[in-house]
Image (cartoon, grey):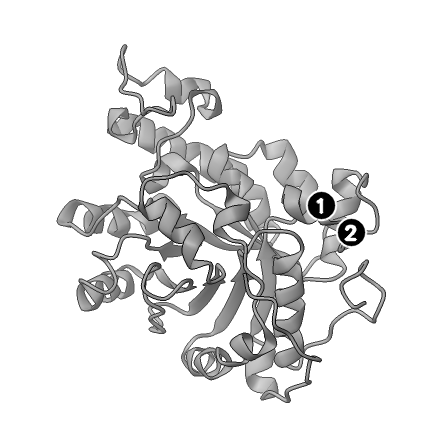
Amino acid sequence: MSTASSRPVSTRRSSRVATRIRVGICAWADPALIESEAFYPRKSMTAEARLRFYAGVFDVVEVNSSYYAIPDIRNTVRWIERTPPSFLFHVKAYSLLTGHHPRPETLPADVTALLPRRPRHTRRGEIDASSFPPEAIDRSFALMRTALQPIAEAGKLGYVLFQLAPWVHFDADRLEYLASLPGRLPGWTIAVEFRHRSWLPDHTADTLRALKDAGLAHVIVDGPEGHAIPRVTTVTAPTAIFRVHGRNAQGWLRQLRGEEPAVREKYDYLYSEGELRELLPEIDGVGAEAEEVFISFNNNNRDYPVRNALMMKRLLGQPTPAEGATGDLFA
């Protein structure tokens, strides 16, 4: 874990660029963040109070609970009501739609009904993604559209993130699937993040060309060098996205070896100001090509994503809360 830091230095950025960059975190209700007691004023806050507090500090967030289960439309409506008009939600696509193996209890009943009588299971009890017929995938997309439609109609939907499973590799079928996404979620910004290195760096040119042809946003990944996919700063759509995962090489290595590190273990990393400052030229370069840039911090352990998101906002010359306004973060 990196713990090096220094006093934040205000960096004057071009207003033309800064107004098009939004910085936030992945998961405002992450248990590690709540348990840290360093951001939210009280550990016992209600879900409503917690979201309202978060939206007073940041103007964008990525929803990752939607990866585990398709959101209930009653919840998405509540999210809209509890945030300011200009607030944006990025939403992570349901696991089944990204090649992951969903747990049986997360499946909607009408998707379960489309499974074969004896579907294959993983050793962890998940339903193997290969067991689902095309009709089940189609139905899952329809349910995602219904759940997210209120957010889109309120003008609060940022991007829908398709973070492909680490075992989903580059091939013609996967390219065809990616090309189908805009038709399945028409009018929405769709972002794609790769985990398998057969996409990047093995087939970089073909991968980026496919994204650009389909109008899909390429997610620029910052992770442990040599273990995560490389940080390729190519813009393929009007929206550009940086997802910042931390550089905990040991955590990523454990997963690559087939182990199952907890989220907190894999993403246990606090960026120093110097490390984030090194990203600024790339952010500027991407900002010169894209219409909007999102930076989402996914180093989800303790209060690390909030600390680093606020640090990045200061480096970009964006306003941040006054000292003492967010727990111990400025102590």
Residue 317 location, x and y as percent? 66, 82
Residue shown at the point (41%, 58%) measured from the top left: 249
Number of marks: 2
**Furthest residue in direction left, as rendered:** 172
Q: CA distance from mark 1 to mark 2?
A: 7 Å
Residue placed most toward the observer, 168 or 7: 7
Q: Which residue is mark 1?
A: 34
Residue 11 rendering spot, x and y as whole percentages: 64, 87
Give the camera-side residue of 138 and 197: 197
Residue 17, given in percent of the width and then of the height, sits at 55, 82
User: Is residue 172 depicted above or below 293 in this figure?
Assistant: above
Q: Which mark is residue 8?
A: none
- The answer to whether residue 304 is visible is yes
The amino acid pointed to by label 1 is Ile
Q: Secondary structure at mark 2?
A: loop
CA neighbours of label 1 inside 10 A, class few (<14), some (14 to 19), many (20+): many
Splitting the image into 4 quarters, where does residue 20 fall? bottom right
Mark closest to the chain's N terminus, 1 or 2: 1
In the rendered structure, are the residues bearing label 1 and label 2 in contact, judged by CB atoms less than 8 Å apart?
A: yes
Q: Which residue is mark 2?
A: 40
In the rendered structure, which amino acid carries the disc numbered 2? Tyr
Quadrant of the snapshot with the C terminus: bottom right
